[in-house]
Image (tube, helix red, strand yellow):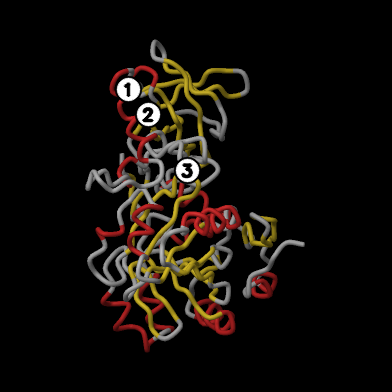
Amino acid sequence: MAKQTALYAKHLEANGKIVDFGGWDMPIHYGSQIQEHKAVREQAGMFDVSHMTIVDVRGPDATAYLQKLLANDVAKLQETGKALYSGMLNNEGGVIDDLIVYKMDGWYRTVVNCSTREKDLEWMSRQSKGFEVSLTERPELAMVAVQGPKAIELVKQVKADAAELIDSLKIFQGKGKGEWFYARTGYTGEDGLEIMVPEAEVAEFWQQLLDAGVAPAGLGARDTLRLEAGMNLYGNDMDESISPLQAGMGWTIAWEPAERDFIGRAALEAEKAERAANPQQALKQVGLVLEERGVMRSHQKVVVDGVGEGEITSGTFSPSLEYSIAMARVPVGTADKCLVEMRGKLVPARVVKLPFVRNGKQQF
């Protein structure tokens, strides 16, 4: 039996088309994925992200433990509420998961993916040996992402008591008010909030947002929005066999201080040296734009004349740009052109720097 979030009845009420997503019954759309996508780009849309796993890390060794566990360095978080994006790596430098960690008042809150929940919790627990820390999962908290140019304004309208707190949030920062937690983060390339809400209160909150004009959006729109924003999807764009250096996540590795021995560091340093010595064999992440009709999809082969081959990791039709876009892993020597194998034919595509769209505007 798939699990259901506290908003399941609301999804059915709104005629959500339900699919199995990482063991959860979740809405893929509520009638029109394109309209939901456009609502987020132009006004405001909301997603039920209660299937994400919230884990609180407390104890005297919480900082030291996370400095060992994550490739990015939580010591960078100077201000309470500030958030950090990081890969959690295995000893070979592959990505077990990507996650967000918030610096709380003397402790940390992490948010990990639902599809990797069990292996993440097992790994986090195993790595805590020798550290004085406690890991507490918070399944009683639901989570709603409200995204788009009008998202913050509409949430403040609905939660007037939190308006001042919301106004004080910087981008990539979260703050709590009672059991609620408001974070100025998201997965769409738009401004907005990800809000943790006690399960008992979330259906009423969802209804208030609906009444205020926020459009419900499903997993389909979430995928096209994140791909336009050049954001990785775990299992597509990286996994345990792919390092952050190959998945466009090099910026999330904190190499300094050199003595911080995070899990996977030795493997990444060896890979970095190998990339410098043999750049022709190294891979990088790029964006692709299809100049003609057709839709690029995951696992299609990418051919770069005179350089080598790569693969599309995520591909779709972009509702904002009205043509196909993709993220691909290709040889480092790839310049601005390549060919994509589609239905047995090699189709020309343009190589661009990610993201494709940010704050509703084309970026390349």
Q: Earlier in the sequence, mark 2 or mark 1?
A: 1
The residue depicted at 46 percent of the width and 59 percent of the height is 128
Q: Position of residue 18 (x, y in %)?
A: 69, 60
Label 1 near label 2: C-beta < 8 Å?
yes
Circle 3 sits on which residue?
90
Does 127 sit above or below residue 308? below
Viewer-proximal residue, 285 or 85? Answer: 85
Residue type of the residue flagged with mark 1: Ala
- Which of pointers 3 and 1 lies earlier in the amino acid sequence? 3
Q: Determine which of the numbered discs, if any, sits on residue 324 in the image.
A: none
Say left or right for 170 vs 145.
Answer: left
The three-letter code of the residue at mark 3 reads Asn
Distance from disc 2 to disc 1, alpha carbons, whole Å, reads 7 Å
Residue at the disc numbered 2: 351
Element class at badge 2 = strand
Task: For label 1, count other residues whose C-alpha is less than 10 Å away and answer few (under 14), some (14-19) or many (20+).
Answer: few
